[in-house]
Image (spheres, helix red, strand yellow):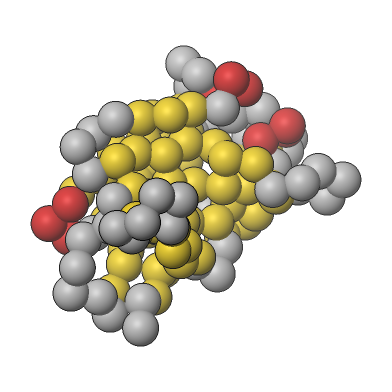
Amino acid sequence: QVQLVESGGGLVQPGGSLRLSCAASGSSSSFNGMGWYRRDPGKQRELVASITSRGTTTYADSVLGRFTISRDNAKNTVYLQMNSLNPEDTAVYYCNAYSLGIRLGERRDYWGQGTQVTVSS
Protein backbone atom coordinates (compact mmCIF):
# COMPACT_ATOMS: atom_id res chain seq x y z
CA GLN A 1 0.00 0.00 0.00
CA VAL A 2 1.47 3.33 -1.12
CA GLN A 3 0.90 6.65 0.60
CA LEU A 4 1.96 10.04 -0.73
CA VAL A 5 2.04 12.90 1.76
CA GLU A 6 2.36 16.48 0.53
CA SER A 7 3.44 19.51 2.51
CA GLY A 8 4.50 23.10 1.94
CA GLY A 9 1.34 24.69 0.61
CA GLY A 10 -0.08 27.91 1.94
CA LEU A 11 -0.87 31.53 1.25
CA VAL A 12 1.70 33.67 -0.53
CA GLN A 13 1.70 37.09 -2.17
CA PRO A 14 2.20 37.50 -5.91
CA GLY A 15 5.87 37.24 -6.76
CA GLY A 16 6.57 35.09 -3.75
CA SER A 17 7.87 31.55 -3.49
CA LEU A 18 6.84 28.22 -2.01
CA ARG A 19 8.45 24.81 -1.88
CA LEU A 20 6.27 21.72 -1.97
CA SER A 21 7.41 18.33 -0.76
CA CYS A 22 5.95 14.89 -1.31
CA ALA A 23 7.15 11.83 0.55
CA ALA A 24 6.15 8.34 -0.51
CA SER A 25 5.86 5.52 1.98
CA GLY A 26 4.56 2.00 2.18
CA SER A 27 6.36 0.71 -0.89
CA SER A 28 9.55 -1.28 -1.19
CA SER A 29 10.03 -0.53 -4.87
CA SER A 30 11.08 2.69 -6.55
CA PHE A 31 8.84 4.61 -8.93
CA ASN A 32 9.57 5.25 -12.57
CA GLY A 33 8.49 8.84 -12.14
CA MET A 34 7.00 11.35 -9.75
CA GLY A 35 5.40 14.69 -10.33
CA TRP A 36 2.88 17.34 -9.50
CA TYR A 37 -0.58 18.01 -10.88
CA ARG A 38 -2.93 20.84 -9.98
CA ARG A 39 -6.64 21.53 -10.14
CA ASP A 40 -8.27 24.95 -9.98
CA PRO A 41 -12.03 25.61 -10.06
CA GLY A 42 -13.11 25.93 -13.65
CA LYS A 43 -10.15 23.97 -14.94
CA GLN A 44 -9.34 20.32 -15.42
CA ARG A 45 -6.43 18.70 -13.67
CA GLU A 46 -3.18 19.51 -15.43
CA LEU A 47 0.37 18.32 -15.20
CA VAL A 48 2.64 20.93 -13.63
CA ALA A 49 5.95 19.10 -13.63
CA SER A 50 7.32 15.58 -13.56
CA ILE A 51 10.65 13.86 -13.21
CA THR A 52 11.76 10.33 -13.99
CA SER A 53 14.07 8.23 -11.86
CA ARG A 54 16.85 9.12 -14.30
CA GLY A 55 16.27 12.84 -13.92
CA THR A 56 14.37 13.68 -17.10
CA THR A 57 12.00 16.57 -16.39
CA THR A 58 8.82 17.84 -17.98
CA TYR A 59 7.12 21.18 -17.30
CA ALA A 60 3.89 22.81 -18.27
CA ASP A 61 4.46 25.79 -20.54
CA SER A 62 2.86 28.09 -17.98
CA VAL A 63 5.49 27.33 -15.32
CA LEU A 64 8.65 27.12 -17.42
CA GLY A 65 11.39 29.23 -15.92
CA ARG A 66 9.53 29.66 -12.65
CA PHE A 67 9.14 26.16 -11.19
CA THR A 68 11.80 23.54 -10.61
CA ILE A 69 11.15 19.90 -9.81
CA SER A 70 13.69 17.65 -8.11
CA ARG A 71 13.70 14.16 -6.66
CA ASP A 72 15.51 12.13 -4.04
CA ASN A 73 15.19 8.58 -5.33
CA ALA A 74 16.60 7.02 -2.19
CA LYS A 75 13.85 8.62 -0.11
CA ASN A 76 11.14 8.47 -2.78
CA THR A 77 10.60 12.17 -2.24
CA VAL A 78 9.85 14.82 -4.83
CA TYR A 79 10.07 18.59 -4.44
CA LEU A 80 8.61 21.49 -6.35
CA GLN A 81 10.27 24.88 -5.96
CA MET A 82 7.82 27.54 -7.09
CA ASN A 83 9.10 31.05 -7.73
CA SER A 84 7.49 34.18 -9.14
CA LEU A 85 4.07 32.92 -8.18
CA ASN A 86 1.02 34.64 -9.61
CA PRO A 87 -2.71 34.33 -8.87
CA GLU A 88 -3.13 31.96 -11.81
CA ASP A 89 -1.04 29.43 -9.90
CA THR A 90 -3.71 29.18 -7.21
CA ALA A 91 -4.89 25.58 -7.06
CA VAL A 92 -4.81 22.37 -5.11
CA TYR A 93 -1.55 20.64 -5.93
CA TYR A 94 -1.46 16.85 -5.98
CA CYS A 95 1.60 14.67 -5.80
CA ASN A 96 1.75 11.80 -8.27
CA ALA A 97 3.92 8.73 -8.50
CA TYR A 98 3.75 6.07 -11.16
CA SER A 99 5.26 2.76 -12.08
CA LEU A 100 5.38 1.08 -15.45
CA GLY A 101 4.59 -2.54 -16.06
CA ILE A 102 6.29 -4.96 -18.39
CA ARG A 103 3.58 -4.66 -21.02
CA LEU A 104 3.55 -1.64 -23.29
CA GLY A 105 1.07 0.95 -22.05
CA GLU A 106 0.73 -0.54 -18.57
CA ARG A 107 0.94 2.12 -15.88
CA ARG A 108 -0.07 2.39 -12.22
CA ASP A 109 -0.58 5.80 -10.58
CA TYR A 110 -0.65 6.83 -6.94
CA TRP A 111 -1.95 10.15 -5.61
CA GLY A 112 -1.51 12.33 -2.57
CA GLN A 113 -4.31 14.08 -0.73
CA GLY A 114 -3.45 17.49 -2.14
CA THR A 115 -2.11 20.71 -0.67
CA GLN A 116 -3.66 24.13 -1.21
CA VAL A 117 -1.59 26.89 -2.79
CA THR A 118 -3.17 30.34 -2.77
CA VAL A 119 -1.50 33.33 -4.38
CA SER A 120 -3.23 36.55 -3.39
CA SER A 121 -2.55 40.08 -2.20
| Furthest residue in direction top, as rendered | 65
Rendered view: 69 above or below 44: above
Image location (x, y in percent) of residue 32: 29, 51
| Furthest residue in direction left, as rendered | 74
Identify the residue at image location x=56%, y=27%: 60
- Left or right side of 35 for 89: right
Identify the residue at image location x=69%, y=48%: 45
Rendered view: 8 above or below 12: below
Image location (x, y in percent) of residue 84: 54, 23
Residue 103: image quadrant is bottom left
Image location (x, y in percent) of residue 69: 36, 36
Q: Image quadrant for the N terminus?
A: bottom left
- Left or right side of 105 for 31: left
Judging depth in this view, the residue of 72 and 88 nearest the camera is 72
Total marks shown come to: 0
Image location (x, y in percent) of residue 43: 81, 43
Asked if residue 85 shows in the view, the reply is yes
Residue 30: image quadrant is bottom left
| Furthest residue in direction right, as rendered | 42
Asked if residue 84 shows in the view, the reply is no
| Furthest residue in direction front, as rendered | 103
Rendered view: 85 above or below 106: above
Identify the residue at image location x=45%, y=50%: 105
Q: Image quadrant for the C terminus?
A: top right
Identify the residue at image location x=18%, y=74%: 28
